[in-house]
Image: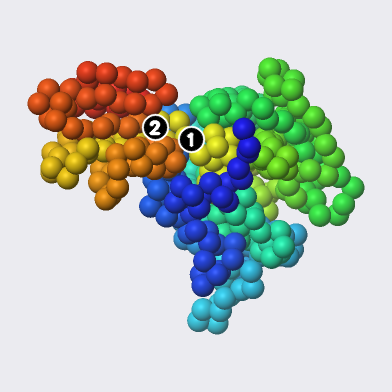
Amino acid sequence: MKQIDHRKLGKKLGIFHISEKVGIGLPLWLPKGAIIRKLLMDYLENEQRVAGYDFVATPHLGRLELYKKSGHWDTYRKNMYQPIEIDKEKYILKPMNCPHHIAIYESSVRSYRDLPFRLAEYGTVYRYEQTGELMGLTRTRGFTIDDAHIFLAEDELESELKNVLLLTKKVFAKFDFYDFKVRVGLRGESEKYVGSDESWSKAEKAIKNVMQKSDLKFTEEKSEAAFYGPKLDFLVKDNLGREWQLGTIQVDYNLPERFDLKYTASDGKKQRPVMIHRAPFGSLERFIAILLEHFQGKLPVWLAPVQIAIIPVSEKFESDTKKLANELKPARVVVMNENNTVGKRVLNAKKQMIPYILVYGEKEKISGKFSLAGDKEMKNLTAKQIVEIMIKIIK
Ligand SMILES: [Zn+2]
Protein backbone atom coordinates (compact mmCIF):
# COMPACT_ATOMS: atom_id res chain seq x y z
CA MET A 1 0.00 0.00 0.00
CA LYS A 2 1.22 3.45 -0.86
CA GLN A 3 2.19 5.29 2.31
CA ILE A 4 0.72 8.76 2.72
CA ASP A 5 2.47 11.35 4.86
CA HIS A 6 0.75 13.01 7.79
CA ARG A 7 0.38 16.39 6.08
CA LYS A 8 -1.87 14.87 3.41
CA LEU A 9 -3.69 12.67 5.91
CA GLY A 10 -4.17 15.63 8.24
CA LYS A 11 -5.79 17.62 5.47
CA LYS A 12 -7.93 14.79 4.13
CA LEU A 13 -9.23 13.84 7.57
CA GLY A 14 -9.64 17.40 8.87
CA ILE A 15 -7.09 17.07 11.69
CA PHE A 16 -5.02 20.25 11.45
CA HIS A 17 -4.44 23.33 9.35
CA ILE A 18 -1.50 25.64 8.90
CA SER A 19 -2.50 29.18 8.02
CA GLU A 20 0.05 31.69 6.81
CA LYS A 21 -2.20 34.33 8.34
CA VAL A 22 -1.50 32.89 11.77
CA GLY A 23 2.07 31.95 10.95
CA ILE A 24 4.04 29.09 9.51
CA GLY A 25 5.13 26.47 12.01
CA LEU A 26 2.09 27.22 14.17
CA PRO A 27 -0.43 24.45 13.47
CA LEU A 28 -4.11 24.97 14.22
CA TRP A 29 -6.03 21.98 15.49
CA LEU A 30 -9.36 21.44 13.73
CA PRO A 31 -12.26 19.93 15.71
CA LYS A 32 -11.30 16.34 14.88
CA GLY A 33 -7.65 16.98 15.68
CA ALA A 34 -8.62 18.58 18.96
CA ILE A 35 -10.56 15.42 19.88
CA ILE A 36 -7.52 13.21 19.20
CA ARG A 37 -5.35 15.57 21.23
CA LYS A 38 -7.75 15.56 24.15
CA LEU A 39 -8.07 11.76 24.10
CA LEU A 40 -4.29 11.36 24.12
CA MET A 41 -3.96 13.84 26.98
CA ASP A 42 -6.69 12.11 28.99
CA TYR A 43 -5.13 8.70 28.40
CA LEU A 44 -1.67 9.78 29.50
CA GLU A 45 -2.99 11.86 32.39
CA ASN A 46 -4.70 8.76 33.79
CA GLU A 47 -1.55 6.68 33.38
CA GLN A 48 0.49 9.34 35.12
CA ARG A 49 -1.94 9.85 37.99
CA VAL A 50 -1.74 6.09 38.63
CA ALA A 51 2.07 6.39 38.56
CA GLY A 52 2.04 9.10 41.23
CA TYR A 53 2.30 12.30 39.18
CA ASP A 54 0.57 15.54 40.13
CA PHE A 55 -0.62 17.89 37.41
CA VAL A 56 0.21 21.57 37.43
CA ALA A 57 -0.38 24.43 35.00
CA THR A 58 2.02 27.26 34.20
CA PRO A 59 1.95 30.34 31.92
CA HIS A 60 3.57 30.60 28.49
CA LEU A 61 5.89 33.44 29.54
CA GLY A 62 8.58 33.77 32.14
CA ARG A 63 11.14 36.40 33.12
CA LEU A 64 14.37 36.49 31.14
CA GLU A 65 16.26 36.30 34.46
CA LEU A 66 14.76 32.86 35.02
CA TYR A 67 16.26 31.59 31.77
CA LYS A 68 19.58 33.20 32.51
CA LYS A 69 19.67 31.35 35.78
CA SER A 70 18.64 28.04 34.19
CA GLY A 71 21.36 28.38 31.56
CA HIS A 72 18.92 28.26 28.66
CA TRP A 73 19.73 31.86 27.66
CA ASP A 74 23.43 31.06 27.35
CA THR A 75 23.25 27.65 25.76
CA TYR A 76 19.96 27.60 23.92
CA ARG A 77 19.45 31.20 22.83
CA LYS A 78 19.46 30.52 19.10
CA ASN A 79 16.26 28.52 19.56
CA MET A 80 14.58 31.15 21.75
CA TYR A 81 12.54 34.15 20.64
CA GLN A 82 13.55 37.68 21.49
CA PRO A 83 12.46 38.94 24.89
CA ILE A 84 9.20 40.86 25.22
CA GLU A 85 9.38 43.95 27.39
CA ILE A 86 6.60 44.38 29.91
CA ASP A 87 6.87 47.26 32.42
CA LYS A 88 10.61 47.53 31.79
CA GLU A 89 11.04 43.86 32.68
CA LYS A 90 12.06 41.36 29.99
CA TYR A 91 10.06 38.20 29.46
CA ILE A 92 10.62 35.15 27.30
CA LEU A 93 8.16 32.86 25.56
CA LYS A 94 9.10 29.67 27.29
CA PRO A 95 11.21 27.24 25.24
CA MET A 96 10.97 24.64 28.03
CA ASN A 97 8.83 24.08 31.08
CA CYS A 98 11.57 23.12 33.55
CA PRO A 99 12.21 26.54 35.14
CA HIS A 100 8.50 26.98 35.88
CA HIS A 101 8.29 23.56 37.50
CA ILE A 102 11.39 24.31 39.52
CA ALA A 103 9.62 27.43 40.84
CA ILE A 104 6.76 25.17 41.94
CA TYR A 105 9.23 22.90 43.73
CA GLU A 106 10.66 25.97 45.44
CA SER A 107 7.24 27.21 46.52
CA SER A 108 7.41 25.11 49.69
CA VAL A 109 9.98 23.41 51.93
CA ARG A 110 10.46 19.85 50.68
CA SER A 111 11.36 16.82 52.72
CA TYR A 112 12.57 13.35 51.72
CA ARG A 113 8.98 12.22 52.36
CA ASP A 114 7.79 14.34 49.41
CA LEU A 115 10.21 12.62 47.01
CA PRO A 116 10.05 11.51 44.28
CA PHE A 117 8.04 14.68 43.62
CA ARG A 118 6.51 14.35 40.17
CA LEU A 119 5.08 17.40 38.43
CA ALA A 120 3.34 16.89 35.09
CA GLU A 121 1.92 19.39 32.64
CA TYR A 122 0.91 19.56 29.01
CA GLY A 123 3.17 22.55 28.59
CA THR A 124 3.21 24.53 25.36
CA VAL A 125 6.63 25.84 24.38
CA TYR A 126 7.95 28.03 21.57
CA ARG A 127 11.23 27.43 19.79
CA TYR A 128 12.76 29.00 16.74
CA GLU A 129 13.17 26.62 13.82
CA GLN A 130 14.41 27.74 10.45
CA THR A 131 11.70 28.16 7.83
CA GLY A 132 13.18 25.45 5.64
CA GLU A 133 13.14 22.98 8.52
CA LEU A 134 9.46 23.39 9.36
CA MET A 135 7.34 20.42 8.45
CA GLY A 136 3.64 19.80 9.17
CA LEU A 137 3.32 18.62 12.73
CA THR A 138 6.76 17.04 13.00
CA ARG A 139 8.72 20.29 13.20
CA THR A 140 6.88 23.37 14.38
CA ARG A 141 7.58 26.65 16.17
CA GLY A 142 5.07 26.07 18.95
CA PHE A 143 4.23 22.68 20.42
CA THR A 144 2.89 21.02 23.52
CA ILE A 145 5.13 18.68 25.49
CA ASP A 146 3.62 15.94 27.66
CA ASP A 147 6.15 17.14 30.14
CA ALA A 148 7.03 16.16 33.67
CA HIS A 149 9.84 16.94 36.06
CA ILE A 150 10.63 14.53 38.81
CA PHE A 151 12.63 15.74 41.81
CA LEU A 152 14.20 12.89 43.74
CA ALA A 153 16.93 11.81 46.11
CA GLU A 154 20.06 10.55 44.39
CA ASP A 155 19.61 7.01 45.70
CA GLU A 156 16.15 6.92 44.09
CA LEU A 157 17.51 7.67 40.63
CA GLU A 158 17.77 4.17 39.22
CA SER A 159 14.44 2.95 40.53
CA GLU A 160 12.67 6.07 39.26
CA LEU A 161 14.37 5.83 35.87
CA LYS A 162 13.07 2.29 35.71
CA ASN A 163 9.52 3.52 36.48
CA VAL A 164 9.76 6.16 33.78
CA LEU A 165 11.11 3.64 31.29
CA LEU A 166 8.21 1.27 32.06
CA LEU A 167 5.69 4.07 31.57
CA THR A 168 7.25 5.03 28.23
CA LYS A 169 7.25 1.40 27.06
CA LYS A 170 3.62 1.05 28.11
CA VAL A 171 2.67 4.15 26.12
CA PHE A 172 4.49 2.91 23.02
CA ALA A 173 2.82 -0.51 23.30
CA LYS A 174 -0.62 1.13 23.60
CA PHE A 175 -0.12 2.51 20.07
CA ASP A 176 1.54 -0.60 18.62
CA PHE A 177 4.86 1.16 18.26
CA TYR A 178 7.32 -1.68 18.45
CA ASP A 179 9.67 -0.62 15.73
CA PHE A 180 11.58 2.03 17.64
CA LYS A 181 15.19 2.62 18.44
CA VAL A 182 16.43 3.58 21.89
CA ARG A 183 19.42 5.85 22.01
CA VAL A 184 21.44 6.68 25.10
CA GLY A 185 22.69 10.20 24.41
CA LEU A 186 26.02 10.92 26.08
CA ARG A 187 28.12 14.03 26.40
CA GLY A 188 30.41 15.00 23.53
CA GLU A 189 33.49 17.17 23.33
CA SER A 190 31.70 20.49 22.89
CA GLU A 191 31.65 23.26 25.46
CA LYS A 192 27.88 23.51 25.51
CA TYR A 193 27.60 20.99 28.36
CA VAL A 194 27.21 22.40 31.84
CA GLY A 195 27.84 20.76 35.22
CA SER A 196 30.66 18.80 36.83
CA ASP A 197 32.32 15.71 35.40
CA GLU A 198 31.34 13.84 38.54
CA SER A 199 27.64 14.51 38.15
CA TRP A 200 27.78 13.67 34.43
CA SER A 201 29.37 10.32 35.09
CA LYS A 202 26.86 9.49 37.84
CA ALA A 203 23.96 10.39 35.57
CA GLU A 204 25.37 8.44 32.61
CA LYS A 205 26.02 5.43 34.80
CA ALA A 206 22.45 5.41 36.14
CA ILE A 207 20.96 5.50 32.63
CA LYS A 208 23.27 2.78 31.34
CA ASN A 209 22.54 0.55 34.35
CA VAL A 210 18.81 0.83 33.88
CA MET A 211 19.07 0.11 30.17
CA GLN A 212 21.34 -2.90 30.70
CA LYS A 213 18.78 -4.37 33.08
CA SER A 214 15.88 -3.71 30.68
CA ASP A 215 14.88 -5.93 27.78
CA LEU A 216 15.35 -3.09 25.28
CA LYS A 217 18.17 -2.91 22.79
CA PHE A 218 19.90 0.44 22.75
CA THR A 219 22.80 2.30 21.22
CA GLU A 220 25.12 4.74 22.97
CA GLU A 221 25.85 7.91 21.05
CA LYS A 222 28.15 10.71 21.97
CA SER A 223 27.08 14.34 21.59
CA GLU A 224 23.39 13.43 21.83
CA ALA A 225 22.95 14.54 25.46
CA ALA A 226 20.94 17.59 26.56
CA PHE A 227 23.18 20.47 27.63
CA TYR A 228 22.40 19.71 31.28
CA GLY A 229 22.55 15.90 31.28
CA PRO A 230 22.51 12.57 29.46
CA LYS A 231 19.27 11.25 28.02
CA LEU A 232 17.38 8.32 26.62
CA ASP A 233 15.53 8.94 23.40
CA PHE A 234 12.93 6.84 21.68
CA LEU A 235 13.25 7.25 17.92
CA VAL A 236 10.80 6.18 15.24
CA LYS A 237 10.84 6.56 11.48
CA ASP A 238 8.21 8.37 9.48
CA ASN A 239 6.98 7.17 6.10
CA LEU A 240 9.76 8.92 4.26
CA GLY A 241 12.33 7.08 6.37
CA ARG A 242 13.29 10.15 8.41
CA GLU A 243 14.01 9.44 12.03
CA TRP A 244 12.19 11.48 14.68
CA GLN A 245 12.60 11.60 18.39
CA LEU A 246 9.38 10.92 20.27
CA GLY A 247 9.75 9.94 23.92
CA THR A 248 12.64 11.25 25.97
CA ILE A 249 13.99 10.70 29.48
CA GLN A 250 16.76 12.97 30.79
CA VAL A 251 18.78 12.96 33.99
CA ASP A 252 19.80 16.31 35.37
CA TYR A 253 22.14 17.17 38.25
CA ASN A 254 22.72 20.63 36.90
CA LEU A 255 19.47 22.58 37.23
CA PRO A 256 19.02 21.59 40.91
CA GLU A 257 22.54 22.98 41.44
CA ARG A 258 21.90 26.22 39.56
CA PHE A 259 18.66 26.86 41.43
CA ASP A 260 20.17 25.66 44.71
CA LEU A 261 17.28 23.23 45.26
CA LYS A 262 17.11 21.47 48.59
CA TYR A 263 15.17 18.93 50.53
CA THR A 264 15.43 17.88 54.15
CA ALA A 265 16.81 14.35 54.43
CA SER A 266 15.72 11.87 57.14
CA ASP A 267 18.64 12.93 59.31
CA GLY A 268 17.47 16.57 59.16
CA LYS A 269 20.32 17.66 56.86
CA LYS A 270 19.72 19.65 53.70
CA GLN A 271 20.38 17.69 50.52
CA ARG A 272 20.32 18.45 46.82
CA PRO A 273 17.67 16.61 44.75
CA VAL A 274 18.35 15.23 41.26
CA MET A 275 15.87 15.92 38.44
CA ILE A 276 14.46 13.76 35.67
CA HIS A 277 12.88 15.49 32.67
CA ARG A 278 10.70 13.15 30.67
CA ALA A 279 7.99 13.08 28.01
CA PRO A 280 6.72 9.72 26.68
CA PHE A 281 5.01 11.24 23.61
CA GLY A 282 7.69 13.89 23.16
CA SER A 283 5.17 16.40 21.89
CA LEU A 284 1.51 16.02 21.01
CA GLU A 285 2.16 17.49 17.57
CA ARG A 286 4.89 15.09 16.57
CA PHE A 287 3.24 12.12 18.23
CA ILE A 288 0.00 12.68 16.33
CA ALA A 289 1.95 13.10 13.05
CA ILE A 290 3.64 9.75 13.60
CA LEU A 291 0.37 8.13 14.73
CA LEU A 292 -1.39 9.30 11.55
CA GLU A 293 1.38 7.84 9.41
CA HIS A 294 1.71 4.67 11.46
CA PHE A 295 -2.02 3.89 11.13
CA GLN A 296 -2.33 5.61 7.73
CA GLY A 297 -5.18 7.65 9.18
CA LYS A 298 -7.11 4.59 10.40
CA LEU A 299 -6.73 5.26 14.11
CA PRO A 300 -7.70 2.69 16.74
CA VAL A 301 -11.43 2.92 17.51
CA TRP A 302 -10.87 4.49 20.94
CA LEU A 303 -8.90 7.31 19.31
CA ALA A 304 -11.05 7.85 16.20
CA PRO A 305 -12.57 11.36 16.30
CA VAL A 306 -15.78 9.90 14.86
CA GLN A 307 -16.48 6.28 15.74
CA ILE A 308 -19.84 5.58 14.11
CA ALA A 309 -21.39 7.06 10.97
CA ILE A 310 -25.17 6.66 10.90
CA ILE A 311 -26.52 6.77 7.37
CA PRO A 312 -30.31 7.15 6.95
CA VAL A 313 -31.49 5.50 3.72
CA SER A 314 -33.89 8.37 3.08
CA GLU A 315 -34.88 11.77 4.46
CA LYS A 316 -37.83 10.10 6.19
CA PHE A 317 -35.46 8.69 8.84
CA GLU A 318 -33.56 11.84 9.63
CA SER A 319 -35.15 12.60 12.97
CA ASP A 320 -34.95 8.91 14.03
CA THR A 321 -31.25 8.79 13.25
CA LYS A 322 -30.60 11.99 15.19
CA LYS A 323 -32.39 10.47 18.15
CA LEU A 324 -30.33 7.29 17.80
CA ALA A 325 -27.09 9.31 17.60
CA ASN A 326 -28.00 10.81 20.96
CA GLU A 327 -28.72 7.42 22.47
CA LEU A 328 -25.33 6.12 21.38
CA LYS A 329 -23.34 8.67 23.42
CA PRO A 330 -20.64 8.61 24.77
CA ALA A 331 -19.66 7.04 21.42
CA ARG A 332 -18.72 9.77 18.95
CA VAL A 333 -21.34 9.60 16.24
CA VAL A 334 -22.26 11.59 13.13
CA VAL A 335 -25.39 11.34 11.05
CA MET A 336 -24.45 11.50 7.38
CA ASN A 337 -27.53 12.84 5.68
CA GLU A 338 -26.01 14.69 2.74
CA ASN A 339 -28.10 14.84 -0.38
CA ASN A 340 -26.60 11.91 -2.31
CA THR A 341 -26.95 8.15 -2.57
CA VAL A 342 -26.47 5.78 0.35
CA GLY A 343 -23.59 4.18 -1.53
CA LYS A 344 -21.79 7.50 -1.89
CA ARG A 345 -22.25 8.34 1.77
CA VAL A 346 -20.92 4.92 2.80
CA LEU A 347 -17.91 5.54 0.58
CA ASN A 348 -17.46 8.98 2.10
CA ALA A 349 -17.58 7.54 5.65
CA LYS A 350 -14.90 5.03 4.63
CA LYS A 351 -12.76 7.76 3.12
CA GLN A 352 -12.98 9.60 6.41
CA MET A 353 -11.75 6.39 8.08
CA ILE A 354 -14.80 6.19 10.37
CA PRO A 355 -14.47 2.74 11.95
CA TYR A 356 -18.18 1.77 12.01
CA ILE A 357 -21.03 2.43 9.63
CA LEU A 358 -24.67 1.97 10.61
CA VAL A 359 -27.22 2.13 7.80
CA TYR A 360 -30.70 3.03 9.07
CA GLY A 361 -33.91 2.16 7.21
CA GLU A 362 -37.40 0.78 7.73
CA LYS A 363 -36.13 -2.55 9.07
CA GLU A 364 -33.97 -0.86 11.72
CA LYS A 365 -36.78 1.51 12.71
CA ILE A 366 -39.23 -1.36 13.28
CA SER A 367 -36.84 -3.82 14.96
CA GLY A 368 -34.73 -1.37 16.98
CA LYS A 369 -31.74 -3.60 16.02
CA PHE A 370 -28.73 -2.40 14.10
CA SER A 371 -25.63 -3.63 12.30
CA LEU A 372 -22.25 -2.03 12.68
CA ALA A 373 -20.16 -2.54 9.57
CA GLY A 374 -16.46 -2.22 10.18
CA ASP A 375 -13.40 -4.45 10.08
CA LYS A 376 -15.77 -7.15 11.23
CA GLU A 377 -19.52 -6.75 11.06
CA MET A 378 -21.60 -6.87 14.23
CA LYS A 379 -25.29 -7.64 13.70
CA ASN A 380 -28.58 -7.41 15.58
CA LEU A 381 -27.46 -5.00 18.25
CA THR A 382 -29.72 -2.77 20.29
CA ALA A 383 -28.63 0.82 20.94
CA LYS A 384 -27.83 -0.18 24.51
CA GLN A 385 -25.59 -3.05 23.35
CA ILE A 386 -23.73 -0.71 20.99
CA VAL A 387 -23.11 1.71 23.86
CA GLU A 388 -21.76 -1.15 25.98
CA ILE A 389 -19.44 -2.27 23.19
CA MET A 390 -18.19 1.28 22.61
CA ILE A 391 -17.62 1.96 26.31
CA LYS A 392 -15.50 -1.20 26.48
CA ILE A 393 -13.47 0.00 23.48
CA ILE A 394 -13.10 3.53 24.83
CA LYS A 395 -11.75 2.17 28.13
ZN1 LIG B 1 12.63 19.96 31.43
Q: Is residue 116 left or right of residue 325?
A: right
Q: Quick check: can you spot residue 50?
A: yes
Image disc number at residue 298: 1
Q: Quick check: can you spot residue 265?
A: no
The crowding category of the residue bearing disc 1, from other C-alpha atoms within 10 Å (few below 14, some 14 to 19, many at least 20), is many
Q: Nearer the viewer, residue 274 or 98?
A: 98
Q: Is residue 59 left or right of residue 291?
A: left
Q: Secondary structure at mark 1?
A: loop
Residue corresponding to mark 2: 355
Q: Is residue 366 left or right of residue 156?
A: left
The residue at 51%/39% (across/down) is 297
The N terminus lies in quadrant: top right
Q: Secondary structure at mark 2?
A: loop
Distance Cα–Cα, label 2 vs label 1: 8 Å
* Residue 315, percent from left and from top: 17, 45
Image disc number at residue 100: none
Q: Is residue 98 positioned above or below 293 on the image?
A: below
Would you say the residues marked 2 and 1 are in contact, meaning their CB atoms lie under 8 Å apart? yes
* Residue 132, percent from left and from top: 72, 63
Q: How many marks?
A: 2
The amino acid marked with disc number 2 is Pro
* Residue 33, percent from left and from top: 44, 49
The residue at 50%/58% (across/down) is 17
The C terminus lies in quadrant: top left
The amino acid marked with disc number 1 is Lys
The residue at 25%/43% (across/down) is 335
Q: Please identify the quarter of the rendering in which residue 319 is found.
A: top left
Q: State the residue lying farthest toward the right.
A: 189
Q: State the residue lying farthest toward the left.
A: 366
